[in-house]
Amino acid sequence: SLFRAPPLAVADSRGDVQHFINDFSARFGDSNNGINFFSGSYEDAINECKNSLRFMIVYLHNPSHESCERFVRETLLSYQMKQFLDRNEILLWGVSVRSQEGYKVSMALRESTYPFLALLCMRETRMVVVSLKSFLNSY
């Protein structure tokens, strides 16, 4: 029919995350400092943190925001961030907001300014956001 909506694309959450990780490594690989993103979907990351009782940091990346590149180079890939993640055994999960998975997570966290980090932890039987931080004013 003329007015039928186009079919929705099948979401590939893990593929979206892996694509982000590959792009991130290609763009920032030389200065990576050994930062490792969890390669599963957001749901996979939540489940991993629930099962292992770990904190989780969510990084939402928007490649069209110039401030994201500076934030990645100066903060996310810093030696201090690497030590913080390692010492506290924090799971780092990231995705581009241009992907379906990234858009879905940005809506779930009600975020539209970038770069963006959220710290999540286990409370009772679910993961909750402990801290939200937009770095728009800093960068």
Image (cartoon, rainbow, N blue to C red):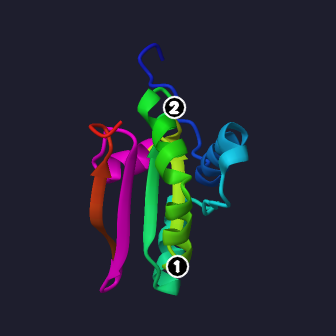
Amino acid residing under circle 1: Arg
Q: Is residue 50 above or below residue 62?
A: below
Residue 115 counted in the magenta span: yes
Residue 104: x, y in percent? 42, 47
Q: Is residue 21 above or below residue 36?
A: above
Residue 101, visible in the rendered structure: no
Q: Name the secondary structure under disc 2.
A: loop
Mark 2 or 1: in front is 1
Specify start and end residues of the magenta stretch as a single range.
Answer: 103-126
Q: What residue is disc 2 on?
A: 63
**Residue for point 50% across, 25% down:** 6
Q: Quadrant of the C terminus?
A: top left
CA gap, disc 2 and disc 1: 29 Å
Amino acid residing under circle 2: Pro
134 relative to 56 in the view: left or right: left
Q: Residues within 10 Å of mark 2 (few under 14, many from 20)?
A: some
Residue 129, visible in the rendered structure: yes
**Residue for point 26% across, 37% down:** 137
Spot the residue most to the top: 2
Residue 39: x, y in percent? 64, 60
Identify which residue, 14 or 114, lies in the foreground: 114
Please identify the quarter of the rendering in which residue 117 is found.
Answer: bottom left
Please identify the quarter of the rendering in which residue 14 is found.
Answer: bottom right
Q: Name the secondary structure under disc 1.
A: helix
**Disc marking residue 87:** 1
Residue 3: x, y in percent? 41, 17
Identify which residue, 33 or 58, lies in the foreground: 33
